[in-house]
Image: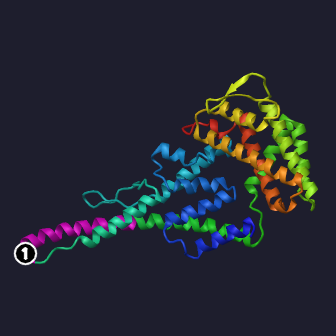
Amino acid sequence: MNTSEYILGLVSKALQGEVQKVSDLIRQAARIARLRNDYLTLWWLEWEMVNISDKEARLRSIDEIIPHLTKEPFAYWHNKFYGIWVDERAVEHFDEDNDPVEGMLLPKGIGEVENDLDHYIKTGAQAISPQGLHSLDLYYKEESNTTVRRLARLGEKNCKNILSRVRNRVSVYLSNVEKQLMFGQIHADIFEENRFYVEKKLGELCPDALTKFVAAYQRTKENNPESWAQALTSCRRLLKSLADALYPARDNLVKGGDGKERKLTDEMYVARLWQYVYESVQNTTSGALLQAQIQDYGDRVDRLYELSCKGVHAEVNRFELNQCLIQTYMIVGDLLRLSDNNSALNADEGS
């Protein structure tokens, strides 16, 4: 089973109703978006699960997304997704005179909304007057229960409306993914935009690296393991060329984010890229995530390269190679945006 088939299976289960709670549906959709490198969708899905009035929670939920965006798109999508979130959380509310109050929101994550719904249902069901009360006591008790049931029904209605809006939005996303996979459409809009940016910026920063990258991309279309090995070699050379441009080798000891000092020599190109990110965006969770991605990617390229050089071709298939190339574009794009001082990692959300 390839990745597309695997994702299609996840989508089908979600759309067939096997995922009942909206919060679980969101988690499933986020899993799918992450597998597809669909970071914009992942953004609003993560926001659905937090109280968006909590700035720390709001920013923490998009730590892995920020490195993939430049400042202007970050500001655009931030405002767009925020506006949609606010519209989804609109609720009915009445003042003491039973007049409607406009502009009221329930600023909670979907998991909290589901808990509130259970609470309102339980509260309304329990608002029943006991038997055996004096008629006057029964009158006041029933009057109180009527108020409780009315408020519980209103709260229940508000929660159900929010959950319905969000479920519909997630279902539309899942059905679009299903259509793309069923009809073989390439989920490449974001990837192609990123590829254009990478090739343009690489041409300006290190043309030699761009030449190697184009060579690697072309070799993936050939149907023999030797070409695949050459493509992986091109990926490694590309990373080294980028490291040479962004963070050249040096003889002196350099202190990294883990507090250890290292001599970042010429062959330590992955470590140099890691250090470049650390020095560019210290003490940010998003920067740390990008560092982890760089390390994981470097390890993967080295593993595939070593396997192909040993002739273990059965263990290096076209799918692995294509995934490696896609990740190369993503990682390189993140680094180039950082070098261009146009990464959302350096953006102020308030601006």
Give the percent coordinates (x, y) of residue 222: 93, 59
Q: Residue at x 42, y 68 (%)?
A: 160
Give the percent coordinates (x, y) of residue 195: 80, 49
Given residues 48 and 77, the one toward you in this image is: 48
Q: Residue at x 38, y 65 (%)?
A: 117
The residue under label 1 is: 135
| 239 is within the stretch colored magenta | no
| 137 is within the stretch colored magenta | yes
Q: Which residue is drawn at 53% across and 52% down?
A: 83
Given residues 276 and 100, the one toward you in this image is: 276
The N terminus lies in quadrant: bottom right
Look at the image and give the residue range highlighted in magenta: 132-158
Q: Say whether residue 304 is left or right of residue 190.
A: right
- 76 relative to 259, above or below: below
- 185 relative to 130, above or below: above
Give the percent coordinates (x, y) of residue 207: 89, 37
Residue 341 in sight? no
Dominant SS in magenta? helix
Given residues 280 and 199, the one toward you in this image is: 280
Give the percent coordinates (x, y) of residue 192: 78, 53
User: Quadrant of the rendered structure where residue 280 is?
Assistant: top right
Residue 115 in sight? yes
Q: What amino acid is labelled 1 in the image?
A: Ser
Q: Say whether residue 332 is left or right of residue 203.
A: left
- 222 relative to 196, above or below: below
